[in-house]
Amino acid sequence: MFTEYSLWLLPLLLVVSVGFGWFVYFFKGKNKSQSYSDRQRNILFALRTLGIFLILFLLISPVKRTKTKTIEKPTIVLLQDNSSSLSATKSSQTYKTKYLDDLQKLSKNLSKDYNVIKLTFGSDTKQLSDDAKWQDSVKFNDFATDISKSMEFISENFSSENLSAIVLATDGIANQGNNFLNYADKFSCPIYTVAMGDTTIRKDISISDIQYNKIAFIDSDYPIEVTIKADKAINEHSSLFMVKDGKTTPIKSFAIDNNDYSITAELKTTSKKAGIEKISFYVQEVNGEQNKINNKEDIFIEVLDAKKKVLILANAPHPDISAIKTALNSNQNYSVDVSIAGNNAKNPADYDLIVLHSLPDNSSSFNTIKSLQDKGVSLLFILGQSTNIKLFNALNTGITVNALSSSTNNVLASYNPAFSLFNVTEDITDILKNMPPLVCLTAKYKTNANIQTLLFQKIGSIATTYPLIAFNNEGISKKAFIMGENIWKWRLQNYLLSNTSSQIDEIITKTAQLVSNKTDKNRFRIEHKNVYLQKENVVFTAQFYNESFELINTPEITLNIHSQNNNASYTFGKNNNAYYLNFGSLPVGEYSFSAKTSYNNKEYKQNGRFAVSANNMELSNLVADHSALYTLSSKTNAKMIPSEKVKQLEEIIKQNDSIKPIIHVNMQNKKFISLWWYWCLIILFLGGEWFLRKYWGKI
């Protein structure tokens, strides 16, 4: 490949090469000491001229262009459902024999012309090897079905290939993950579906859903909603029962008045002890019901003994104190005490949160607050007219107040939409617009990078970036700030507008909750789920930190598991700088564990509880959803076929003109100066001329 300029130089190089060859030819011809024949001189002339020409030819940087062609086969992904809902139908033996044999033949035939990827899915997605047989890999025994996760797996691993078609073989019953129909627009290839399972609706009553909070607190009421569904059971009667602490309680009786019946029972219950609490619900079976497994459902709730102790410490009585105490006491998770600074009846270090109203006001309160701050106690500052600003600034809280005078400003609240430490509902932001002003110092406020502001100060009609309510979660002591007093007026105004103070109480309690949550500084940590599903792998991880809080895994960690029927001991495996332990699946029940390790002659221990829940997701609904499969295929210009005709997919795929290989053409330019054979030619011509001249000169 040459440029236009290079082509003009080519004749010049040829003339120079021939001229130089003639010059040598003529000079040697005059040398009488050597006598060559005309034939010999012509050969030497030709070799010399070619060698010189090849060398001069490199001056125009010639390039050799090569073209390579590769063919990428179309990729076909075969995605087979391996969940237990397929084995629960009457036709399961057909699926395990003829269907899997037909699927194996389909895979083998498609492999001749296509790149076939074989995947199984249930609770997770697994890729099979190329030589794996479907009969050996598919057992229809997975405890859940997550089609969306398998779609994500395909998108992440095969979208860069020539992905030409997806074959999804399932009954369409997805009980985990997102709606798989949303993935129709994510792929540009057709998604063929193989309709499996049974669409027959049989007489059945079941617990279809339970809504509840997975975490509750001791002595606190928490709601539970149980939804019951009945199919083809008109004119039947049934009742819902709750089993808790070995006691059975009737919840609701009902008469089924249609063949597509649904009812939701609402209840409240209370837990009296901390730990993992099991609550069972069951609905009475109806006459002629075949699937009775879905009549019962267990839930597990983590009950916490986490009542926070709060101390309101003030320099003098003030209406704000009563307002804050009332707001916090509205939440049963707080225990609130009040004390005046200088009164030693309360020990501030015993509390999870100290509310400091108009403090520090003197050196004594400053020293107390400084000591609490150094110990990592959480603090909520409410600045008032009695606050000593110089002492407050000396605490280095993250907010500096530069007072301009001894006067005060009436400051309104302006919500910061960028605040993200906790959720603020729309009704709260609306009510804040109608709150009376707080009394703040006339000052300039400076905040460091760690301050996150919930409400800004609005002075008259001027919106500022000065904080009104703000947080600093950095350092060993978490801090919150209310930069003005008279928040008691907010509660009264809230009640005046909506007959409740709940919105302002929620701001106060969420502020207290955020600040009072302690940072985990334990050097020995065990992490696990509180509830594992039946057949799910029970996995624990652990971390251990040295004195400098660096993650290490030098010491061995042992863990003992205790249940009603079994006790077992394990040793954690080491993974990078942490620990990992997989028990596999455990029987349904409640478990406790104790873990311990030793480091630098000191022993560390951790105890806890977890549960394994009987999981009936796959058996709670056995009615196949072929309409969803049809919709998915229609959206991607593909077809749905019944499982007994799965072999027909080979012909259907081959007839699709959009499924074709991709031809990749790669053009590569290589300079002649880098070609080894080009230099060999130069050496051959010049070396041959030199050798022949020496050889013939001696004859």
Image (spheres, rainbow, N blue to C red):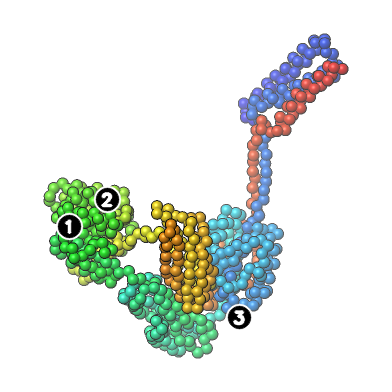
The amino acid type found where label 3 is placed reads Lys
- Which secondary structure lies at badge 3? loop
Q: Earlier in the sequence, mark 3 or mark 1?
A: 3
x, y percent for residue 397: 26, 52
Mark 3, residue position: 90
Read off the residue under disc 1.
358
Q: Residues within 10 Å of mark 3 (few under 14, many from 20)?
A: few
Q: CA distance from mark 1 to mark 2?
A: 17 Å
3 w.r.t. 178: above or below = above
Judge whether residue 257 can be spotted in this image.
no
Identify residue type, mark 2: Gly
Quadrant where the N terminus sits is top right
User: Distance from label 2 to label 3 (Cα)?
Assistant: 69 Å
Which residue is rendered at x = 43% and y = 80% of the image? 280
- Secondary structure state at the residue bearing disc 1: loop
- The quadrant of the picture occupied by the C terminus is top right
Residue 589 x, y percent position in the rendering: 47, 76
Report the front residue among 284 and 435.
Answer: 284
**Horizontal and vertical percent position of residue 509:** 27, 65
Q: Which residue is mark 2?
A: 398
**In terms of depth relative to the viewer, which is nearer, 182 or 133?**
133
- 506 sits to left or right of 54: left
| Sequence-first disc among 2 and 3 | 3
Report the residue at 82% width, 10% height from top: 32
Crowd class of label 2 (few under 14; some 14 to 19; many from 20; radius 10 Å)? some
